[in-house]
């Protein structure tokens, strides 16, 4: 042994370790900030299982939910540094990379997810997926969550009810302007901090979907939730250009197909999760769900709509018209 071992070690150094014939699968860390029982959580888990089943010899998807790997203010850098390979940040969080995506934040632009879907599938919507590859990021598809509701520690029926309140927002200039338009203060904070900021009373309110409200227990930290459906919270599944271009064309094709299938699965679930979580919030009875009369709703629309014009130059009027046109 004393002779054979050094000889083997030398041979390994000279010719490399004996090859098992197969390269190790590429790890795809999918990092996100919500729970598993949400549209995004379900999409990530679906992708993991599709990949495991069909290309487990080539890829392994590791899913990190609930900001357990990266928070939403770290994820883009993590993708660019190859510390994470996939994520699905909310469209509101892309502002630094492209102004065009601000279209999705405009208040009262989309009537419902059907209209959103129509716009996202249009050539203009699809073009946005590749509109910031020069910044090192590539969109692989859109993923739904749902329409946002307004919650606070006071009843909000008309815009004046929100005057002077502090709302948590995602880091988006449009959302900041939307709250300024109703005389409220908007404070950008990572998703992982919202529950504690609300429950300690540091912030008075926030806007989010039924699924995020329920899964993060925001309804236990707020007295009222106004069913305003005033804006959209959707996602883009993204990877880095570097990671993507390092893959063979066969791997790109198969991975893209897997992502698309996972998205279709979760998008189909999104509406059901939205309705089920809305009902769970109502049943919990911890926060009163406030319905708006037509007249009250019109007041919110009137107060917030001028925001469109503020961002028209950056987004492009044609793109806004195209998105709005998807409502018909
Ligand atoms: C938020 O920050 O409120 C959302 O973007 C969280 C998410 O990913 O749904």
Image (spheres, grey):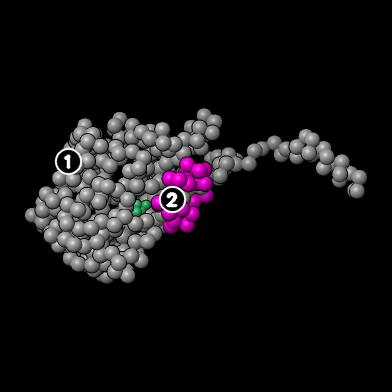
94 is higher (above) or lower (below) than 184: above
Residue 68 as seen in the image, left or right of residue 304: right
- What is the crowding at mark 2: few (fewer than 14 residues within 10 Å), some, or many (at least 20)? few
Residue 66 included in the magenta stretch of the image: yes
Residue drawn at point x = 53 percent, y = 40 percent: 54
Secondary-structure class at tag 2: loop
Residue that appears at 26% across and 59% down: 167
Coordinates of residue 153 in the picture (x, y in percent): 23, 67
**What label does residue 309 carry, if any?**
1
**Disc 2 or 1, which lies upstream in sequence?**
2
Q: Residue at 82% x, 37% y: name it.
A: 11
The secondary element bearing badge 1 is classed as helix
Q: Looking at the image, which residue sits at the far left?
A: 295
The x, y position of residue 223, in whole percent, is: 24, 68
Classify mark 1: residues with Cα within 10 Å, few (<14), some (14-19) or many (20+).
few
Which label is found at residue 227?
none
- On the rendered structure, is 230 left or right of 236? left
Counting from the top left corner in percent of width and height, residue 147 is at 26, 51
Q: x, y percentage for residue 37?
A: 40, 56
Q: Which of 193 and 31 is in front in this view?
A: 193
Q: What stretch is highlighted in magenta?
A: 61-84
Instruction: In the rendered structure, find residue 74 and report the number of the disc placed on it.
Output: 2
> Number of marks in the image?
2
- Considering depth in this image, is 99 or 210 the residue closer to the camera? 99
Q: Does the magenta stretch include residue 60?
A: no
| Position of the C terminus by quadrant | top left
Q: Which residue is drawn at 47% across and 57% down?
A: 68
Q: Quick check: can you spot residue 9?
A: yes
Task: Specify whether residue 208 is in view.
Answer: no
């Amino acid at each position: 042994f004393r002779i054979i071992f050094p000889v083997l070690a030398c041979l390994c150094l000279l010719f490399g370790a004996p090859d098992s014939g197969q390269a190790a699968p590429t790890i795809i860390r999918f990092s996100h900030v919500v729970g598993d029982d949400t549209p995004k959580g379900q999409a990530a888990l679906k992708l993991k299982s599709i990949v495991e089943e069909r290309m487990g010899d080539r890829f392994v998807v590791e899913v990190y939910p609930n900001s357990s790997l990266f928070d939403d203010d770290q994820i883009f850098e993590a993708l660019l540094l190859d510390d994470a390979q996939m994520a699905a940040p909310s469209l509101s969080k892309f502002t630094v990379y492209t102004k065009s995506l601000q279209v999705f934040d405009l208040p009262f632009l989309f009537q419902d997810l059907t209209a959103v879907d129509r716009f996202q599938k249009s050539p203009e919507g699809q073009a946005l997926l590749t509109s910031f590859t020069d910044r090192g990021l590539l969109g692989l598809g859109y993923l739904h969550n749902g329409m946002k509701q307004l919650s606070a520690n006071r009843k909000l029926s008309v815009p004046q009810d929100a005057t002077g309140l502090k709302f948590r927002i995602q880091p988006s200039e449009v959302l900041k302007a939307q709250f300024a338009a109703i005389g409220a203060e908007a404070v950008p904070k990572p998703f992982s901090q919202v529950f504690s900021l609300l429950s300690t009373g540091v912030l008075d309110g926030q806007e989010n979907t039924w699924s995020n409200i329920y899964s993060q227990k925001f309804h236990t930290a707020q007295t009222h939730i106004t069913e305003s459906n005033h804006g959209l919270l959707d996602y883009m599944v993204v990877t880095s250009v570097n990671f993507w271009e390092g893959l063979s064309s066969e791997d790109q094709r198969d991975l893209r197909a897997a992502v698309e299938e996972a998205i279709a699965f979760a998008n189909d679930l999104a509406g059901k999760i939205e309705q089920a979580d809305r009902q769970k919030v109502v049943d919990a009875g911890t926060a009163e769900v406030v319905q708006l009369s037509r007249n009250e709703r019109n007041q919110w629309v009137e107060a917030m709509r001028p925001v469109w014009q503020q961002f028209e130059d950056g987004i492009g009027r044609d793109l806004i018209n195209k998105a709005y046109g998807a409502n018909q």
